[in-house]
Image (cartoon, rainbow, N blue to C red):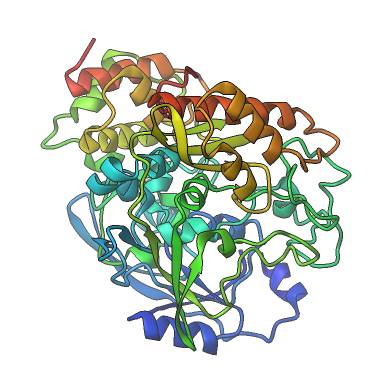
Amino acid sequence: MIPFQYTRANNIADAVRLIAATSGAKFIAGGTNLLDLMKDNVERPTTLIDISRLPLTSVEETASGGLRIGALVPNSDLAWHPLIEKRYPLLASAILAGASQQLRNMASTGGNLVQRTRCAYFYDTATPCNKREPGSGCSAISGVNRGHAILGASTSCIATHPSDMCVALVALDATVHVTGPNGARAIPFADFHRLAGDTPHIDTNLGPDEIITSIEVPAKGFASNHSYLKIRDRMSYAFALISVAAALELKDGMIQEARLALGGVAHKPWRNPAAEAALRGRPADEASFAGAADLLLRDARPQAHNGFKLDLARRAIIRTLSQAAHGTPQSQSNKTIQ
Amino acid sequence: MQDGAAQSGAKPQPLPEKVSVTLTVNGTERRFSVLPWVSLLDALRDHLDLTGTKKGCDHGQCGACTVLVDGRRINSCLTLAVMRDGAHVTTIEGLAANGALDPLQQAFIDHDAFQCGYCTPGQICSGVGLIAEGRAKSADEIREFMSGNICRCGAYPNIVAAIQQAMGTKP
């Protein structure tokens, strides 16, 4: 870790002013990912602006029946918030599928969105990485890439976004509220993260001097028919090889509305409107689910070591939609997959 | 790592100054000055001589550094001491009260829930946090919510049994 200055923001305007005025500065909230990267010399901020004491820790109901979640609500508090458990159990489940309780106690809601990939080459400063050092090359494309992207990858970067929470948030049509030097704006969740393209060092569409203030989820929470299924190399406390968030609205066994998002497959939480549209008006059965999976994975392209992800993703999509349809969401404690 | 700064080509920054930090550690107020990059873990071990909290991976992956901050279990390696100014910290040294072990400490002895003992302070602080949360009840849930604490000796079955004893469930 290189030496850095430390300062504390007194309010949101102060935070925005400080980050705009300080070259090489970064915000720190929970610090679980940033400090980890700083210890490996991947992140090298000149100044840390501590935003952890800003008053962004409330969960409030919105006039339209949704919830506005403060950017500094710890992941653990969010997963166990009574309104989240009752109305957005898909979000609660996805949060509890990620990290450990100690990390969830520290990590913030906003920080979860801007965490960096866990690609081993991004962490290893001895190897080329376009995300860490633009133009240096991608070590993963010719290296060990069993954990990498199968959708939307570029010739510059095949890293995946590591979050579980974000997979549920994109499925729920959340909105990210941010504030910057030019005021506040709202970013639809599906537009918040970027594909790598030829600028993989830019993970999101958050401006360099903007701060996330809250995440809003709309009224529809799919509390009756949802599931989050995470497949990984060990039973707990590991990043996803494939994860699926599924939510259905059913009437007489027919699908009125479907949400389907994947983690572990792309540079951003992956959602495909065409696959969801294909489910609408169809019976909630395996044939419909398989059709949606095939549509979603139609453009999937494996790397040298992750061809297994295509079949794994297909099976996981079908299984998660089936769990959602039956109202039997995946338990995040008992890992038996029903 | 100073060489990183040299390579970055950034303008030389004024050398950061030490920051005064006050923590209430195991019920006692402690005031000290640290540079901004000192983790809470290093502050506890190197500045306050509380070496019960262990440094394992120093990356939040092993849980050996787990302490309770304002009653919640966290990885002390992934937070800066300066960020925690004013906080109440409980470490393994602060769990026994009036010479009596915490029920979870006694349960670890009763169930032989450790071998080398290096992960044990973190396991016990994590378990105390888990019991205070009141969420994990079944053995499956205890295993899941203790997954942030690695035991390379593999004492996991006895750790789960010790937590169950301290919770008053079984055995």
The one of B36 and A207 positioned closer to us in this rendering: A207
Q: Position of residue A169 (x, y in %)?
A: 46, 51
Task: Using the rendered view, name the quadrant where residue A316 is placed.
Answer: top right
Would residue A67 appear left or right of B15 to someone viewing this image?
left
The one of A196 and B72 positioned closer to us in this rendering: A196
Q: Classify B47 as above or below A161.
A: below
Q: Which quarter of the figure is the N terminus of chain A placed in?
A: bottom right
- Residue at x 51%, y 60% (from the top left corner): A189
Would residue A190 appear left or right of A77 to someone viewing this image?
right
- Residue at x 39%, y 75% (from the top left corner): B19
Residue A232 visible in the snapshot: no
Would residue A98 appear left or right of A275 to someone viewing this image?
left
Find the residue positioned furthest to the right: A142
Q: Position of residue A323 (x, y in %)?
A: 46, 25
The one of A175 and B69 positioned closer to us in this rendering: A175
Q: Position of residue A297 (x, y in %)?
A: 72, 38
Q: Position of residue A245 (x, y in %)?
A: 51, 39
Find the residue positioned furthest to the top: B171
Task: Using the rendered view, name the quadrant where residue A150 is placed.
Answer: top right
Task: Using the rendered view, name the quadrant where residue A125 is placed.
Answer: bottom right
- Residue at x 33%, y 18% (from the top left corner): B139
Residue A213 visible in the snapshot: yes
- Residue at x 52%, y 47% (from the top left corner): A167
Q: Classify A131 as above or below B138.
A: below
Q: Classify B18 as above or below A37.
A: below
Would residue A140 appear left or right of A110 to someone viewing this image?
right
